Amino acid sequence: MRDKIDALTKNLAHTIVGKSEAIRLVLVALLAGGHSLLEDVPGVGKTLLAKTLARSIDGKFQRLQCTPDLLPTDITGTNIWNPKSGEFHFLPGPVFANVLLADEINRATPRTQSALLEVMEEHQVTVDGVSRPVPTPFFVIATQNPIEYQGTFPLPEAQMDRFMLSLSLGYPSEEEELQMLQNLDGSVKRGDLQPCITLSEVQELQQICSRVKVDISLQQYMLDLVRATRCDEEITLGVSPRGSVALHRATQALAFILGRDYAIPDDVKFLAPYVLCHRLIPAGGRRAKTVMERLLRAVPIP
């Protein structure tokens, strides 16, 4: 299965130039059974990344463009009356996909945002008292613009906690942007991209990642990091137990992607800012990343 990981990474790198770290993090979230939140400015490739991933795993892709007038049923689906049969028929919403892109999620109202809470955690949708499972694997990539806040609705803590990782792609370097322009001559076409892994193989990879060994001393290190956020004077709201589980699963997935069947402290140190920062609320206008870097220096490494 290592060849599958390499092929998947190569497929994504064909269209997402120079973002190897972001690609690795998105694959970590996918293989760990989580979801990703991309906080970045427009035009850096967030949508392209989601489409390329869905194409690479031969999965169904759905895009949800979030706007203030979007309703919860526009996400989950609704029952439609059929006059011919005299019965209600369920019309599935865009969540019934393998890769769901929730574009500019903070432009949807809190009521609409809450429609994603159940499906992100339990992989099912309940409409009119009937629960329906979504396809597996199910992976949500949500995006939001961290600069423009006019007409937006910030994600509540419960919603932020559903995302395993929060990251940004960032602007490309000069060389990378030049390569992007050179690719416009048609030598690299998005339509030519072929699936390199099946959905069943993705599920198999997820099961393999869950068996990666994490020593008890490393588990204690994760716990020390999480508990440090709950009693720090510079943090108003610390990381929940869901954050501990997310860090553990992400660490297993990263170790596997890097070719190991065991995790090491460097895996935890690398992932901690991406897994924990968006789950805590710093006090006094401090930056979550700065606080987390201080905690990583303070907590002893096993």
Image (cartoon, helix red, strand yellow):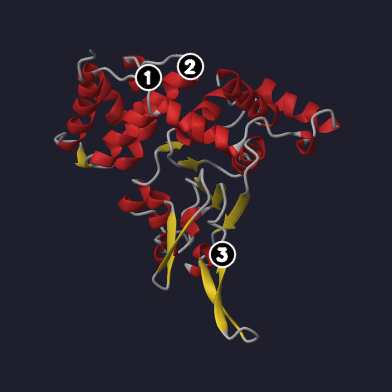
Tell which circle, 3 or 2, labels the residue nearer the N-terminal end.
3
Name the residue beneath numbered marker 3: 92
The CA span between labels 1 and 3 is: 39 Å
View extreme (front): residue = 85
Tell which circle, 1 or 3, labels the residue nearer the N-terminal end.
3
| Mark 1 and mark 2 residues within 8 Å of each other at the beta carbon | yes
Provide residue 67's location: percent of width, then percent of height. 54, 63
Local crowd size for mark 2, using a 10 Å CA cut-off: few (<14), some (14–19), many (≥20): few
Q: Quadrant of residue 246?
A: top left
Q: Nearer the viewer, residue 207 or 28?
A: 207
Q: Nearer the viewer, residue 220 or 165?
A: 220
> What residue sits 56% from the left and 64% below the top?
92
Name the residue beneath numbered marker 1: 267
Tell which circle, 1 or 2, labels the residue nearer the N-terminal end.
2
Q: Nearer the viewer, mark 1 or mark 2?
A: 2
Q: Is 87 located above or below residue 179 in the figure?
A: below
The CA span between labels 3 and 2 is: 38 Å
Name the residue beneath numbered marker 2: 258
Local crowd size for mark 1, using a 10 Å CA cut-off: few (<14), some (14–19), many (≥20): some
The CA span between labels 1 and 2 is: 10 Å
63 relative to 31 in the view: left or right? right
> What residue sits 58% from the left and 86% below the top?
86
Amino acid type of the residue tagged 3 in the rendering: Pro
